[in-house]
Image (spheres, grey):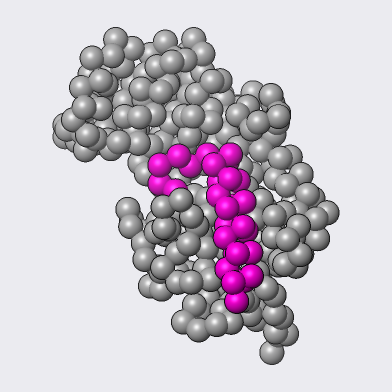
């Protein structure tokens, strides 16, 4: 049997939301414990260059997360390399079971487990991630000024990404498996009217093509789903926009969720449907999904938790 440890605030997840919550709750003398999870640092650790973090004109994603962890620890937060495999929110103190065998009990829980972009699952996609393959146009679109890019998807996310990329790219090709889009009509109208956008209907992406040294994307191989005919589409960047999946497995049967699993919070707060449980960052945000908004919500969660505990 592993040990049992109690904390006033247990933070689950280690992206910008989790680390910011740790900084604020440590400063409030709540002695938080943060459990990092399977991907310490979250999605920013697979983002090479970040140019939209305030105060840094240019920073490597992994470096930024190392600094955030160091900041949280300097404030007094305890950061643990472990994974929470189960969480019982039915009674207080809340009980979290870690993969290592340790049991954590907590007076308040801050959930900051984030979300993951859905990927196609192609080996070539994995190979070029961060080297021409991205799932975030607002993060990486700037790097494709004067270049041609491809976006795959058919919903609001794909159309938003394609339209955003027209600010930088000379041409944006949107590829969709069907002959109609799922996106809102007003967005479709904007897309179809844009002179830089071309839509390739009834096609799926088979392979991302590129160079080895340096590693980079040169095009994609697409297949017509009806005829089987293959087409090579030249491009410098490939954006996957087939949706995001919130990492809400721990709480999906315990907390109120919406939009495919995002945790519901009371507007203007990080309060979930269970008092004493707070959610921040991409786990609850299906709209913005930015590091800076996640950090802001991490701050809110710590302040909400502090008020909740003080009220007892």
Determine if residue 266 is in view.
Answer: yes
Give the residue drawn at x 42%, y 21%. 165
The picture places residue 41, in percent across and down from the top left corner, at 65, 50
Per the picture, the main secondary structure of the magenta-coloured stretch is helix
The picture places residue 1, in percent across and down from the top left corner, at 69, 89
Give the residue drawn at x 70%, y 45%. 65
Farthest-out residue, right: 74
Dividing the picture into quadrants, the one containing residue 31 is bottom right
User: From the viewer's perspective, is residue 202 above or below residue 172?
Assistant: below
Q: Is residue 119 left or right of residue 53?
A: left
The question of residue 276 being in magenta is answered with: no
Dividing the picture into quadrants, the one containing residue 301 is bottom right
The picture places residue 251, in percent across and down from the top left corner, at 45, 69
Which corner quadrant holds the C terminus?
bottom right
The question of residue 306 being in magenta is answered with: yes
Q: Which residues are magenta?
A: 285-312
The picture places residue 77, in percent across and down from the top left corner, at 76, 61
Q: Nearer the viewer, residue 281 or 122?
A: 281
Q: How many marks?
A: 0
Farthest-out residue, bottom: 1
User: From the viewer's perspective, is residue 279 above or below residue 254?
Assistant: above
Dividing the picture into quadrants, the one containing residue 33 is bottom right
User: From the viewer's perspective, is residue 163 above or below residue 39?
Assistant: above
Q: Is residue 288 left or right of residue 70?
A: left
Determine if residue 115 is in view.
Answer: no
Give the residue drawn at x 73%, y 47%. 68
Give the residue drawn at x 53%, y 31%. 139
Q: Nearer the viewer, residue 69 or 43?
A: 69
């Amino acid at each position: 049997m592993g040990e049992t440890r109690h904390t006033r605030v247990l933070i689950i997840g280690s992206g910008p939301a989790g680390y910011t919550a740790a900084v604020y709750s440590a400063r409030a003398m709540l002695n938080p414990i943060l459990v990092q999870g399977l991907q310490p640092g979250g999605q920013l650790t697979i983002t090479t260059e970040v140019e939209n973090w305030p105060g840094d004109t240019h920073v490597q994603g992994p470096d930024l997360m190392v600094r955030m962890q160091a900041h949280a620890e300097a404030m007094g937060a305890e950061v643990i390399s472990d994974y929470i495999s189960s969480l019982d929110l039915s009674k207080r103190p809340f009980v979290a079971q870690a993969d290592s065998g340790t049991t954590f009990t907590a007076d308040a829980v801050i959930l900051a487990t984030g979300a993951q972009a859905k990927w196609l699952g192609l080996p070539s996609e994995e190979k070029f991630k961060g080297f021409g393959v991205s799932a975030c146009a607002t993060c990486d679109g700037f790097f494709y000024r004067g270049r041609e890019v491809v976006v795959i998807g058919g919903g609001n996310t794909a159309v938003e990404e394609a339209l955003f990329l027209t600010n930088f790219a000379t041409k944006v090709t949107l590829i969709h498996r069907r002959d109609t889009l799922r996106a809102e009509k007003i967005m479709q109208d904007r897309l179809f009217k844009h002179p830089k956008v071309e839509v390739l209907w009834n096609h799926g992406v088979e392979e991302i093509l590129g160079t080895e040294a340096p590693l980079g994307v040169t095009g994609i191989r697409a297949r017509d789903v009806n005829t089987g005919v293959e087409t090579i589409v030249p491009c410098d960047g490939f954006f996957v926009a087939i949706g995001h999946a919130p990492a809400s497995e721990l709480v999906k049967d315990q907390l109120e969720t919406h939009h495919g699993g995002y945790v519901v919070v009371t507007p203007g707060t990080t309060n979930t449907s269970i008092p004493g449980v707070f959610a921040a960052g991409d786990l609850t945000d299906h709209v913005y999904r930015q590091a800076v908004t996640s950090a802001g919500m991490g701050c809110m969660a710590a302040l909400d938790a502090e008020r909740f505990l003080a009220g007892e």
